[in-house]
Amino acid sequence: MRRLNFVGLVLFSLFLALPLDAPYAQQQQSVRVATTTPAPSSYFGSERSAAERITADEMKEILYYIASDDMLGRDTPSPGLDKTAQYIADHLKKFKLKPAGDNGTYFQHITLSRTQVDRENTKAHLGDKAFKVGEDFLPVGRVSGDAEGQIVYAGHGWVINSKNVNAYDGLDVRDKIVVVSGDGTTPPPGLSVENLPGTDWESPVSYAQKHGAKALVLIPRNFERRWRFGPNALTRSTLSVPRLENAAEDEDEDEADAAAPKGLVEILPSRAMLSALFAGEQADGARVLQASTAGERLKGFALSPSKRLSLSVKLSVTDASTQNVVAVLEGKDSALKREYVALGAHYDHVGTDNPGCRPVGDDKICNGADDDGSGTTSLITMAEAFSKGPRPKRSILFVWHAGEEKGLWGSEYFTRFPTIPLKQVVAQLNIDMIGRSKKAGDTNPANRMLTGPDEIYVIGSRMMSDELADKNVAVNSAYLNLKYNYHYDEPNDPERLFYRSDHFNYAKHGVPIIFFFDGVHEDYHRPTDSPDKIDYQKMQSVARTIFILASELANAPSRPVVDKQIPAEQLAR
Ligand SMILES: [Zn+2]
């Protein structure tokens, strides 16, 4: 599962998305236990015996391979991730599942772009004074270019019509370089945006761009932290998915690949650069910096017209690639087989020895056994169980997503450029972390929210379809009767779990979803998330339950009714 971050805010910034430490939710967990008496073992008939092909022993064998040190933490992109993709594809071939990626293969190819600052050719001047990249300023956008002009300070830079907020009031930014307090995409304290961008509000960046500004100088609230880590990042490259940066749903792949990144040159100034820019102005550099880091509102103004800033930012961009793994088990009903029940997991993790994977002693490889080796493994064993029959009426779609940890890339890519018609997906069941359980007597606060051996969090099941949620409850109470915990079943929960895994992108496209999750634990995103810590009996129980639910959905006379949509403002976040 993805680390807590502002999913949905597009952070066009090289250094902005520094990992945050996920705070634990404060609420007490509330457990709703299904009270129905378990039905006799004849219930679900042949589905039950098919589910029993999913065994703890086989799961253990697969997971020990996927979460081995050989995979080096399955970063996106990496040889270890490609090796895992091939391992999944080899199984699918053996199970004789239909390839549903590109050109009759199991792989849906995703082109990535690697950006690095060209230090030699990245420069800034204020009149005759030269600034040094890495010391006086850092490029923070993904756009190369030259800009020269007078300077305007635009305060926090937000325009929110419904709240009568306009930081650009009285300022002309055309052909100017705009200095903004903030990171350009996160509203300042006390201001939030609920309605849709463009109509009700403009971010500092989008306003500047639409009104002819030439470049942006951003002073984020975490200025100090950015300067502590930023210069190191100059020597590293950052990744993006070019095809996802174009908002259009239906553009041609070749055009998207050819399109240059849009936007303005953006830099982070140093204290010294701010002092030089604001020398002799109504607020000096120290005052502007203080207001920026405190989130205090300072009114904008045009700087002395004699000051002209020139920026030249050069980024080198190279291609890289990764892939989703996609397969279909074709349904047996000639009409219903055009519809799909989707099963999803993410097979990537956070790699080795990087800011997202903190070493534990000498161990620097984040194996991701639970996250999401457990879901990846479950999907493989479910694919095998389905392939041996009986064949359900609807088709089953299996997607192992890449790049989940980078920002739900694989699921965004699949749902925007699906290889089967997405409207024909009747539900998506996302399995991300189902292998850990809290041991009796465990008092470690880091395991406070971890579910017990017979318990699992069920998230989002009622957000779009009561019928889907009811079916999930009915299957569980008539089968293994696990404790379904709905604690996180609330889009406004501070942990924001609804936004933090791949199901979110399916929900965004109108597909009703259920997210199965065991809870954050002491080994989350650490090298100690290893296969020896997994509760394989729990994995087996949860995977078998999801298998029966998927079978029931695939055999039902009609698809689950979507009786509500997720409000647009929640999806825009
Ligand atoms: Zn994760």
Image (tube, rainbow, N blue to C red):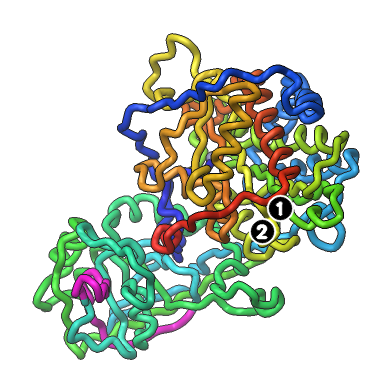
Q: Which residues are magenta?
A: 145-165
Give the farthest residue toward the front: 557
Residue 147 highlighted magenta (yes or no): yes
The crowding category of the residue bearing disc 2, from other C-alpha atoms within 10 Å (few below 14, some 14 to 19, many at least 20), is many
Q: Earlier in the sequence, mark 1 or mark 2?
A: 1
Quadrant of ligand 1 in image: top right
Give the farthest residue toward the left: 282
Is 296 placed above or below 484 here? below
Q: Residue at x 50, y 32 (%)?
A: 457
Q: Residue at x 84, y 42 (%)?
A: 92
- The circle drawn on residue 324 is 1
Callout 1 secondary element? strand
Q: Residue at x 48, y 58 (%)?
A: 565
Dots 1, 2 in contact, CB < 8 A: yes
Left-right relation of 182 to 543: left
- In the image, which is nearer the foreground, mark 1 or mark 2? 2
* Amino acid marked by disc 2: Phe
Image location (x, y in percent) of residue 370: 60, 30
Question: Dot 2 corresponds to which residue?
Answer: 414
